[in-house]
Amino acid sequence: MNLGHDLTPVAAGGLLDRRLFLKQGLAFSAVVLSADALATAEHMRPESSKTAGEAFSNYGLPSKYERETIRWTVANSNADGNGVAWTPLQDLEGSITPNGLHFERHHNGVPDIDPQQHQLLIHGLVNKALIFNLEQLLQYPMLSRMCFIECGGNSNAGWRTEPIQTKLGYFHGMVSCSEWTGVPLRLLLNEAKLKGRAKWLVAEGADASLMNVSLPLDKALKDCFIALYQNGERIRPENGYPLRLIVPGWEGVVNVKWLRRLHITNRPVMARNETSKYTELMPSGTARQFTFVMEAKSVITKPSFGHKLTRHGLYQISGLAWSGRGKIKAVEVSADGGKTWALAELQTPVLSQCFTRFRIPWQWQGETVILQSRAIDETGYVQPTRAALVAQRGTHGYFHYNAIVSWKIATNGEISHVYA
Amino acid sequence: MNLGHDLTPVAAGGLLDRRLFLKQGLAFSAVVLSADALATAEHMRPESSKTAGEAFSNYGLPSKYERETIRWTVANSNADGNGVAWTPLQDLEGSITPNGLHFERHHNGVPDIDPQQHQLLIHGLVNKALIFNLEQLLQYPMLSRMCFIECGGNSNAGWRTEPIQTKLGYFHGMVSCSEWTGVPLRLLLNEAKLKGRAKWLVAEGADASLMNVSLPLDKALKDCFIALYQNGERIRPENGYPLRLIVPGWEGVVNVKWLRRLHITNRPVMARNETSKYTELMPSGTARQFTFVMEAKSVITKPSFGHKLTRHGLYQISGLAWSGRGKIKAVEVSADGGKTWALAELQTPVLSQCFTRFRIPWQWQGETVILQSRAIDETGYVQPTRAALVAQRGTHGYFHYNAIVSWKIATNGEISHVYA
């Protein structure tokens, strides 16, 4: 295994210098061929090359061999189309979520919206009430940016007394990351001319729940936009076709899908999703409300629950970090349950309010280890331990769980979720 | 129209300061509602909200209303699965091409490869011949990066005597841009231990044409990698499932799909696709060969052929620029056929060997104009006019056409392709 390279750990549990693999050629798991085996391999012609392949397609789909890489859906049997479909983070790499696997959270199903009929209304505390159809909106100036969208309820199984044993995506998969393109809200609000008393905006979707939420105008004017495109193509139905409000870094529910109305007001509307939901009872006995920002979080995606280590030797740990407050400044990884930490390598470019892929080399020699990652964002905020989060927020939490996640590797290579 | 903002052109034909729309709220095409119309609009409930919507899906697809946003395929009737499927660049925004719309170029169809059976062989001038199955390769360290892939034959209709009248995607759509994730080739070649005489690598695919090409080892060791993931998910069949060689910035044919073999040699293999194809007769009577790099290019995607301007007033011109030699440094736009130019705004982050979206405000008052864009990359290279390209390369060209593209806007708003 040791080819003369420096495999001195930089933290306990076998963590190695983050740039080791960038420089060196090390043995992982290739088979070295003998002369005989090589002669055989050189003369083999794969089955796939013996007949002409499939024809072209107008729109491509994943391989039939990848049918297990899907969104896992949990539907509420008491309300049509209410539930969640989770992004399978454990099966993905890089920092973009493909459109077909972006998580879904709907309150009353995915509406069938004819883009020729759809309109967006801007009214309330404005000097000019405006209405747009799609053709008109498509003529406005646009911008593009990558950002994550995370449901405020993502990872809420973390509040349970016992650690949930389930695949990463079914625990943390209500977060995804895309390149969105659309019209800056500032342009439209300036054209409508806000009145002096205007302080809030109530955004409403065209789905059967007429889902609505309130958003402070200062955020709307700062960096929100009305997206028409996701990862290059028009937004898909389950992500808001034809229009979605994008509110970078803030909880998913305010990124209103199937957007039909922006009502300018001087106070929040006190909708269901900002009173009975997306609020939280704190240890003090009072409730948090309008906790919009998604704080820094990270998860190790590989290895994670459901994977199994089948050999001793070198691995690359890979994971995702993100923060609603800006860029990820650093990600640290521990292989001893949080006693010692090593810096992971961040995949560039590191973008604000966006997934950042991190990776670090690790040598596993068969011992029991507890792998953790913690994100630090550009504000200096450090992802908390579970104990610290519970101390701050109590035991009645549901939303905004962002504690450090711990994967325990057993001596047989099996992986479980633990609180450490 | 003029709301007191500075709409002084920065170049002829109505081009405006590139940052105008970032600062101002200007009237485009919204309808301002009267009090009566507003009362009606406020009480309308869209059809889509009257019944519960569709259920969740394991893997999403585009809206049924977007069925015209597809790859246009041109198949060779003399060879099964030989042809092209073009990316509809005229319908896309941002800089990522969604996986379903990445262009396809196959020589003998899309092979059906069982990932459990697939192997990658590294042999020839190495001290250790290595073989990998997918499970082994997935354990290697990975990197992610965005890059474009462009067929060397993209835009070749530009060599025709008369300008082709067709949608942008059917003219320039053999280029797409994705985030790819995979194993650095350097790691694998170092593990195999190259012999001193090793200078080239011959990459071969597992399709029915056993498509093979030669690649200098210095490029392979510099930045090439074996991709397993595209835009987060495993590569799709038509883009090389399960393995594709990524050669950033170099012509598409060397980005070998369905990769099965890397044969290390001391000279190129002189395969069909580096002798009878992908070479070009020059005015001198000699042929160019191994012209790997895709030089800087840009196209205005909106407006472009097939779009129609339906009103006078403000527009945002939008387009794509890319260079195989590195980052795009600037894109200039002309509305008078190349006599005067204005700087376009570049969407950030600007990444090396990657699509860069550019945009610029433009006021059209109904006159005939010729819109052009020209890319300048970080080496200082400037995208040439068609006349300059023809002067250099002659009239027998087929590959590597990267001249400035000209769209003529007629007084009725219709758009044609011209040589200007």
Image (cartoon, coloured by chain):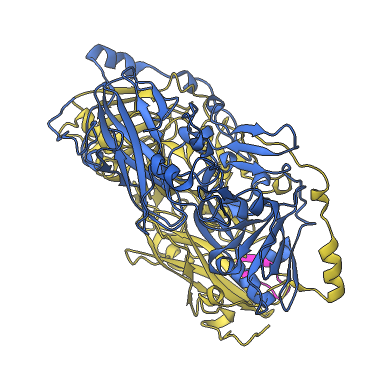
Chain colours: A blue, B yellow
Could you tell me if residue B297 is visible in this image? yes
Magenta stretch, residue numbers: B408-417
The image shows residue A257 at horizontal and vertical percentages of 66, 52
In the image, is residue B27 above or below residue B147?
Answer: below
Q: Is residue B389 left or right of residue B74?
A: left
In the image, is residue B364 above or below residue A180?
Answer: below
- Quarter of the picture containing the C terminus of chain B is bottom right
The image shows residue A194 at horizontal and vertical percentages of 66, 76
Q: Nearer the viewer, residue B226 or B262?
A: B226
Magenta residue check for A288: no
The image shows residue B331 at horizontal and vertical percentages of 45, 68
- Quarter of the picture containing the N terminus of chain B is bottom right
Magenta residue check for B410: yes
Residue at the extreme left of the image, as rendered: A4
Q: Nearer the viewer, residue B290 or A97?
A: A97
Write down the quadrant of residue A87 in the picture: top right
Q: Residue at x 54, y 76 (%)?
A: B23
In the image, is residue A383 above or below residue A67?
Answer: below
Residue at the extreme front of the image, as rendered: A285
Q: Residue at x 68, y 73 (%)?
A: B410
The image shows residue B305 at horizontal and vertical percentages of 64, 61
Q: Residue at x 28, y 33 (%)?
A: A335
Could you tell me if residue B125 is visible in this image? no
Q: Nearer the viewer, residue A265 or B231?
A: A265
